[in-house]
Image: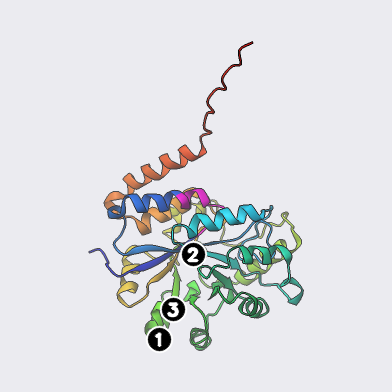
């Protein structure tokens, strides 16, 4: 049975998967009957190349003001908020006045967009300087204590992203039911629950971003070549099936996050097809998306210039 409650799916790759997300939004508009009933894109989250506030994943490179304006308009013009992942866990007071990050915030400061935070110093700065943004508590805070989580739920956040270690903690889920519409659940995490190195990994990515050091390769004890494909992800302990998601929806949870930053495009596409598309229509939608991506990547031939007569 298809669910008719309106649910919001938060997608990865604000910049990195821009083409895929652009195509997905178009296909959802053109073939709404092929997607699960009541499912909408609630936001597209991610990092901006070169921004020191980036967290979770370090992203190097550079972006111009025009680049940022194009990215924001791509999503906002379709009614989809952008969500900046400002979750660098090593930020201090000296970093909040960063010229580039503040330019990004000004460009998208239209009352529609969102930020993920995990450091009080940046959160307080954004609340003061950019009150038009919706503030979201990040899973990178690693809140795995029930009482601390309930305290977090009582704060002035638009959403709180649940630590995936608690996704199947029935006592926690039951206590969250009265505020279920304020909880966001990550459904396709490839990492293992209770990883002792998770916070160290976040810190290393944060250091790399602050120092623009792209030489770091964090050694994860659980990382394998196979974990970069969706079929392997489905075998991971933290993965949530569509049947489980439907069970959570029945209990009032309506915000779900699809992970994929730092992973191959094919992993993200397979995740979209599994979670968002009706089972019988997956191959049809895969073909439509794949064809559209190929067309975007194929250079358009310019018409020949008319020859001048001597």
Which sits in the foreground, 197 or 71? 71
Q: Which residue is mark 1?
A: 175
Q: On screen, 201 above or below 20?
A: below
The answer to whether 118 appears left or right of 268 in the picture is right
Graded by Cα atoms within 10 Å as few (under 14), some (14 to 19) or many (20 or more), the crowding at tag 2 reads: many
In primary-sequence order, the first of circles 3 and 2 is: 2
How far apart marks 1 and 2 lie (CA) works out to: 29 Å
**Comparing labels 3 and 2, the label whose residue is closer to the camera:** 2
For the point 73% across and 75% down, which residue is it? 92
* Residues rendered magenta in the picture: 12-22
Label 2: state its secondary structure.
loop
The answer to whether residue 135 is magenta is no
Q: Nearer the viewer, mark 1 or mark 3?
A: 3
Residue 165 is situated, as x and y percent measured from the top left of the image, at: 49, 74
Q: Judge whether 272 appears above or below 140 on screen.
A: above
Q: Which residue, given by chain and number where applicable, does mark 3 sit on?
A: 182
Residue corresponding to mark 2: 81
Q: Position of residue 237 (x, y in %)?
A: 44, 66
Regarding mark 3 in the picture, which secondary structure is present there? helix
């Amino acid at each position: 049975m298809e669910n008719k409650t309106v649910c919001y799916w938060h997608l990865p790759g604000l910049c990195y998967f821009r083409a895929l997300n652009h195509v997905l939004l178009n296909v959802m508009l053109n073939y709404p009957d092929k997607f699960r009933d009541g499912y909408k894109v609630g936001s597209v989250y991610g990092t901006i190349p070169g921004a020191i506030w980036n967290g979770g994943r370090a992203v190097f490179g550079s972006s111009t003001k025009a680049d940022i304006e194009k990215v924001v308009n791509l999503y906002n013009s379709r009614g989809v908020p952008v969500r900046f992942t400002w979750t660098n866990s090593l930020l201090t007071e000296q970093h909040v006045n960063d010229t580039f990050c503040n330019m990004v915030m000004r460009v998208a400061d239209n009352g529609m967009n969102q930020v993920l935070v995990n450091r009080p110093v940046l959160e307080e700065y954004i609340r003061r300087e950019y009150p038009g943004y919706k503030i979201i508590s990040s899973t990178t805070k690693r809140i795995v204590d029930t009482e601390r989580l309930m305290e977090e739920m009582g704060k002035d956040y638009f959403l709180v992203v649940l630590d995936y270690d608690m996704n199947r903690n029935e006592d926690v889920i039951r206590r969250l039911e009265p505020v279920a519409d304020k909880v966001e659940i990550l459904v396709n995490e490839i990492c293992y629950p209770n990883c002792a190195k998770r916070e160290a990994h976040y810190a290393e990515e944060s250091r790399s971003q602050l120092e623009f050091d792209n030489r770091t390769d964090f050694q994860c004890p659980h990382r394998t070549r196979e974990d970069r494909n969706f079929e392997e992800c489905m075998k991971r302990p933290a993965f949530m099936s569509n049947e489980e998601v439907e069970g959570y929806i029945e209990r009032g949870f309506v915000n779900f996050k699809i992970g994929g930053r730092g992973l191959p495009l094919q992993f993200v596409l397979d995740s979209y097809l599994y979670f968002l598309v009706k089972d019988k229509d997956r191959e049809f939608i895969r073909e439509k998306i794949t064809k559209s991506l190929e067309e975007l990547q194929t250079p358009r031939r310019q018409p020949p210039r008319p020859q001048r007569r001597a």
